[in-house]
Image (cartoon, helix red, strand yellow):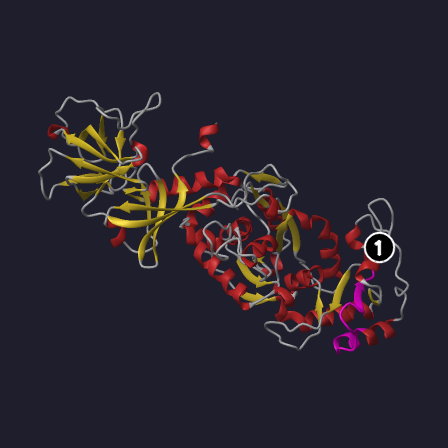
Amino acid sequence: MEEASNFIEQIINEELESGKFASRGNEICTRFPPEPNGYLHIGHAKSLCINFGIKEKYHGKCNLRMDDTNPSKETMEYVQSIMDSLQWLGFTWDNLFFASDYYDKIYECAEKLILDGNAYVCDLSAEEISATRGTLTEPGKESPYRNRSVEENLALFRDMRAGKFADGEKVLRAKIDMASPNINMRDPVIYRVAHVSHYRTGDKWCIYPMYDFAHPISDAIEGITHSICTLEFEDHRPLYDWVVRKCGFAEPLPRQIEFARLNVTNTVMSKRYLKRLVDEGKVHGWDDPRMPTLAGLKNRGVPPMAIRDFCTRIGVAKANSECELSYFDACVRDYLNAHAERAMAVLNPLKVTISNYEGAGEDAVINRNPTDPDAGTRNIAFGKHLYIDSDDFALVPPPKYKRLVKGGVVRLNGAYIIRCDDVVLDEAGKVVELICSYIPESRSGNDKSGVKAKGTIHWVNADTCVDAVIKQYQPLLRDADYPGQDFGERMNYDSEKILYGKAEPYLAEVAEGSSFQLMRVGYYKTCRDEGKLCLSEIVSLKDNFNNKK
């Protein structure tokens, strides 16, 4: 048996060694059970990696199950988006199930609880139930309907199913212990009336099970061995165990294990809030590149393996903590640095004319990826007229400036050293063109000039380049210093910036969705925006995480 790499695997190893699962051939089975009420986000990736990682390590199974017990918020669009995200991340489920597949069985379990004296129909409103629940230091008060007879409870529950009561008029509650120190065990509601059409079952049902009731039953039906969930469900574990036992499921029963959820700074980590962003038009949709949804990260160009690597690096813990967004960016940057081809684009073009260059058809040469010796090189057309980034020239340079100044020199990546001889200004005093000369003996890879250039800058050929829409992104939330505040008070309304630059033509020729390091700029994905080349930022070159170490 392989050594455990975290506390969950340690539990599984101990149970396997004890023979707990011998009757089922020691097959371990997990599940990923999202509610289809929104798109999956980066936080779900951690649960996916844990559940499918257990499947892979123990050669077991992992089901995908839609926990669709709240029909007012669930749609097939969300179901499809969940499946698409799993496939994009490279996970393959063994079975696709829906909690709604088990509605008949869950109903039978509810009737069994009634017949065994373990459930009753209650007429209290939601507010009244909450008011009688008690506190952490005071027991709750028993419902006046708690001691109804089995016959009356059964008849009322069947009337609930038959649609004889309005929403909220009656609920079915588990009969456990109103004095329990665990408030979740104080006669929780397990069924409610809801005259809402379900996206799969239509109008067959007007009562729906609560999550805490449907979830353990679904796990038991599927033969799940380990129900891996986030830490907020730790207090629900006694109820989980109570349900599977009282409903009469056979051993071995599924075991709930909790782990710390993934929280990331500057990031909205709630489907409810993410839906608000979409509904209120704060973003362009669930797959907006600024969204932390897996669809958004895919649209942004984040490689799926970088997400899986990030989840592996942060590990599996028992205590909640918060991960810095810069750490996620570092993982993405590391992956792209090793895999992305290099190219050049100028975000804020400044024209350069090389007065003494009369060559034609000459190419500069750049490495496709300096980290990969086998990646090779690529030729880029050089010429008399170029564009450089306006930030790479300064009329009045700051201290330690290593780029181009009047009378100074700089190397053009993969080409020559140039000297700025003159500057053309417009009427407002803005620099509009540089008149430069090149040093013929300074060609990259064969420099015999003896001239030392302190800086190297990127460029594009003005005669062959293409126009490019360039999109840059910042976090949706301004910073991590507003805990507990609504996202509306923390929104970064300048999170999307659009520039209009110039790019080498190669970027318009490659397949849409290709990832590149735009040298000295950042990592970008190629796409089309109204027929034009668009370069959409994946992650910047600046490493804010490792630079703090």
Q: Is residue 30 visible?
A: no
Q: Nearer the viewer, residue 169 or 359?
A: 359
Query: Is residue 487 rendered to the left or right of residue 249?
Result: left
Residue at image location 82% in from the left, 71% down from the top = 115
Around disc 1, counting alpha carbons within 10 Å, would you say few (fewer than 14), some (14 to 19), or many (20 or more)?
few
Q: Is residue 447 left or right of residue 17?
A: left
The residue wearing badge 1 is: 131
Identity of the residue drawn at 40% across and 35% down? 542
Q: Is residue 298 above or below residue 371?
A: below
Magenta highlight range = 157-176
| Residue 95 x/y as whole percent | 53, 65
Q: Residue at x 66, y 61 (%)?
A: 215
Which residue sits at x=28%, y=46%?
502
Residue 166: in magenta span: yes
Q: Is residue 39 left or right of residue 468?
A: right
- Please, is residue 430 above or below residue 150 in the view? above
- Residue 347 in the image, given as x and y percentages of width and height: 32, 42
Which residue occupies the extreme front position in the image? 427
Q: Nearer the viewer, residue 389 or 134?
A: 389
Expressed as whole percent of the image width and height from the top left, the position of residue 214 reads: 68, 64
Residue 228 can be seen in this image: yes
Residue type at mark 1: give it. Ala
- Position of 205 with respect to 178 (left or right) is left
Q: Is residue 131 magenta?
A: no
Residue 272, percent across and down? 61, 55
Local SS, label 1: helix
Quarter of the figure with residue 201: bottom right
Q: Quadrant of residue 276?
A: bottom right
